[in-house]
Amino acid sequence: MKLSSIASTLAALAVAVLAAPRNIVRAPSNFVTTQGRNFFVDGSPFRSGGGNAYYLFLLNEDADVVKAFQEYADASIKTLRIWAFREVVGSPPAAGNFTQLWKNGVATCSQGGQDRLKLILDTADSFGIRVTFVLTNNWSVDFPTNPAKPPGFYSNSFGGIDTYVQQIHPGAAHDTFYTDPKIIAAYKKYLSFVVPAFKNHPALFSWELANDLRCQGASGTTTSSTCNTVTITTWVKEIAAFVKSLDPNHLVGAGDSGFFCTQPTCPKVNGPSPTKRSNGWDKRWVFDGPAYNGHFGIDTLDICNDPNIDLCTIQFFPDQQDYSETPGGSPGLTGASVTSGIDFINFHHSEGPNKPLMLSAVAITNQANAADLNNFDSTTVGTPPGQPVATAAEQLSAFNSIFSGNGNVTALFTWEQQVTGITSGAIISKKRQTNIGSSPNDGMQVSPGTPVYQSAINNNKAMAAPPT
């Protein structure tokens, strides 16, 4: 692969980030704030390399939570993104924590789940790590479990949007979540339970309204013909304002993957984007690829322009998502797929509002992990037949190209770091085990001892260093 041009592209983006004009969100001392496209803590710039650990909430043993954070700290991780929810249907689970128990369409919030989230934040604080809490998931294939592995092993086996939908309106379309008053009230009930509990916690980095918002849900769900970008942006406006009313101290992100709607006919909820295109549509920026044409029901610029959204998000999977400007891109990691992905990020920088841009998940699967790849929209495991999978060398080359120019990018979260020697049977059994081994691997894990792991550590250290 020829990826040498990517570093210079990202370096230019970093300069643009620092040169952005001021746009300040203030909060009490020791909380993360924003100023233009950068984060600040106590008046000093705060940059971070971090990771994802969706499964952390399910660890039953306090010692395992401490061990996990010790390994994150050893890897120079300063920010961590985790699932702050687990929906359970019917009876309490035999293992692991949960946040809501659903019976006959009514959810009961779990104090034990809230207590576990507090333990995670308290432990993070002791290691100097800040945590983003994700409040629900677009991908919830389990009703109630993913049959491929025990509950909690994969990121889409925690419940989420479709749990709300199917519990309250069985058989309804996935996007009913964004419009139905009963479902919105149920979601606000959970938010009212969990958000105020942590509004004063210094280890909380931000709230994320949902992981990877889309009109489309997991395999087996349906989408109505009326869902579009306005549907989801309107929902974001209501929910972001609600979260801010519960917690004015912490930042809020929508959690979308950063998809655009570049056509001039795209309706706007929050007014015209305050970019060069607000003075006239530039035909050079009208793209038809699925990441640009509103296909997923996401208009990330309109979402980011909401006054209660403090940061913009991208999820970056260049071997799984087609970021081409025109339709027809091929799956798998290639020089072209990484380059088009970097162009996608570049478009965010050039066209986005004056707010921080956070790469909330960045992952590339290699051949060693391919058999474990969890296809987020289904219960199937393993890369699709015929899809090329990166070698370890190709994966490293791509990661190095992504990392090399991002010294001043706001925040970047690689996918989950492997944590070894877990002793609790949180995901398998109530009882303590002698050793269940390492943390769950959904095919995007970064394992200690590998060149990619060391590259991620180097990136984390570079991002945490004071700007020059």
Image (cartoon, rainbow, N blue to C red):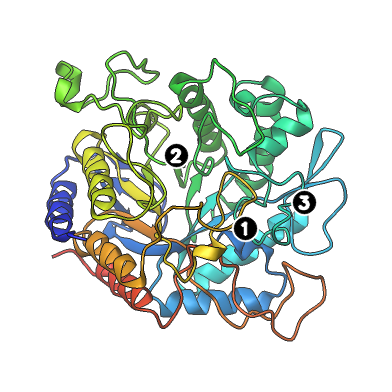
Which quadrant of the structure image shows residue 321?
top left
* Quadrant of the frame with the N terminus: bottom left
**Among the two numbered marks 3 and 2 on one chain, the one whose residue lies closer to the N terminus:** 3
Position of residue 310 measured from the top left corner of the image (x, y, whole percent): 38, 40
Q: Which residue is mark 1?
A: 154
The residue at the point 49 percent across, 22 percent down is 234
Q: CA distance from mark 2 to mark 1?
A: 20 Å
> Mark 3 highlights which residue?
110
Q: Amino acid at mark 1?
A: Tyr
Residue ID for mark 2: 256
Given residues 415 and 318, the one toward you in this image is 318
Give the camera-side residue of 165 and 254: 165
User: Is 311 above or below relative to 74?
Assistant: above
Is residue 366 among the parts visible in the rendering?
yes
Q: Assess whether mark 1 and mark 2 are in contact (beta carbons under 8 angstroms).
A: no
Going from N to C along the chain, the mark reached first, 2 or 1, is: 1
Q: Mark 2 falls on what kind of element?
A: loop
Amino acid type, label 2: Asp
Q: Position of residue 104 (x, y in %)?
A: 87, 34
The answer to whether residue 189 shows anywhere in this view is: no
Of the 4 image quadrants, the one containing the C terminus is bottom left
Label number found at residue 390 = none
In space, the residues marked 3 and 1 are separated at their CA atoms by 21 Å
3 vs 1, front mark: 1
Examine the image and state in which quarter residue 427 appears.
bottom right
How much space separates mark 3 and mark 2, taking CA atoms? 27 Å
Amino acid type assigned to the residue bearing label 3 in the image: Ser
Could you say which quadrant of the image residue 287 lies in?
Answer: top left
